[in-house]
Image (cartoon, rainbow, N blue to C red):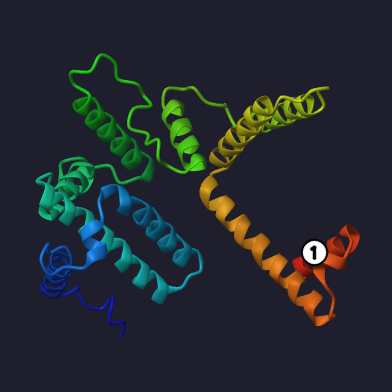
Amino acid sequence: MNEYTDKPQNLDKISKNMRELVLIMRKLRNKESGCEWDLKQTYNTIAPYTIEEAYEVAEAIYENDMDKLCDELGDLLLQVVFHSQIAYELGDFKLEDVIAAVCDKMIRRHPHIFGNKKEKDITSIRKTWEEIKQQEREEKSQGSDFLSMLDGVSNNLPALMRALKLQQRVAKVGFDWPDLYPAIDKMYEEINELKEEIEQEAPDQSRIQDEIGDIFFVATNIARLAGCEPETSLILSNRKFEKRFRQMEKEIRKNNQSIEALNLDELETLWEKAKKVVG
C-alpha cells in the first residue's frame, strides 16, 4: 500500500500546517518581539532568495532526490508566505488574495475541466491555454497605446529562458523557422560572423560579445525546435561536465599527480577516460 497514493490528502492537516507556517512568519515579523533579520527584509532583499530556492527545487528534481525535493519545496513555499506577509504589512495584498488569484487562474485556464470545453488532446488544450493567456494580457493592457506580443515576458528571467519565451511568442504569429535545419544553418552563419570579428586587425570586443549573444540566441532556437528546453539542456550539460571533471581529479589523485603539472594532451586522455567511466 502506498500511503501517498492510496488515500486522498488530508486537507484539514494541510490547512492546519499552512496556518502554522503563516503564524510562524507573523511572529518572525513582529515589530516588538520578532527576529532582527526577518524584520529588515523587503520584497527586494528577499527576491534573490526566492530565485535561489526555485533553482534548488529544480536541482533536487534533476538529482531525483525526493527527500531533498520535499525540503526545497518547503523553502520555496516559505518564500511565498514571506512575500505575502510583507505585502500584508504594507497593505498591498494578503496571502488569501494570492491563493484566490491562482485558483481563479487555474479554473479559467482549464475550461475543459471546469467549464464547457470538450477538447482532451494536448494540442487543443495548449492552444486554449495560450488563447486565454493572451486575452488576460489584453485585459491588463487596456488603456495603454499599444499591446506587443512580447508584453509580459519578464526582464528578470535567466537569459536562455527569456530567449525561449520571446521565440515562443513570435512563433505564434508565424515568425519562425519552418523546421530545425535552417536554424542549424543559421548557427554556422553566426559562428562564421564571430570568427570574422575575432580575426579583425583590431577586434571590437563589443561586436564580439554581440556575435556571441547571437550564437546563444540561435542555440536556444535550435533547442526549442528540437523539442528541448534550453535552460534544462544547459543545466544537464553543466552537471555532466562536473561529473567528468571530478572523475578526472579522482584519477589524478589516485596516481599521486598534480593537475597543474599535466599538459593538455595528458588532460585530454584523462577526460576521455572519465567519459567512459561516468558517461
- Amino acid bearing label 1: Trp
Task: Tell me the quarter of the image containing the C terminus.
Answer: bottom right
At x 67%, y 28%, the residue is 186
Judge left or right: residue 215 versus residue 191: left
Q: Residue at x 62, y 55 (%)?
A: 237
Q: Is residue 279 visible?
A: no
* 63 lies above or below 120: below
What element does badge 1 sit on?
helix
Q: Please tell me which residue is depicted at 84% across the width and 81% down the height of the picture.
A: 256
Q: Which residue lies furthest to the top in this view?
A: 145
Toward the viewer: 111 or 171? 171
- Image spot of residue 145 (x, y percent): 25, 14
Instruction: Mark 1: give few (<14), some (14-19) or many (20+) Cα within 10 Å.
Output: many
Vertical arrangement, residue 191 with respect to residue 15, above or below: above
Residue furthest to the bottom: 1
Q: Which residue is drawn at 9% across and 46% down?
A: 91
For residue 130, which quarter of the picture?
top left
Instruction: Report which residue position mark 1 lands on.
Output: 271
Looking at the image, is 134 positioned above or below residue 30? Answer: above
* Residue 104 seen in the figure: yes
Nearer to us in this view, 122 or 241: 241
Quadrant placement of the N terminus: bottom left
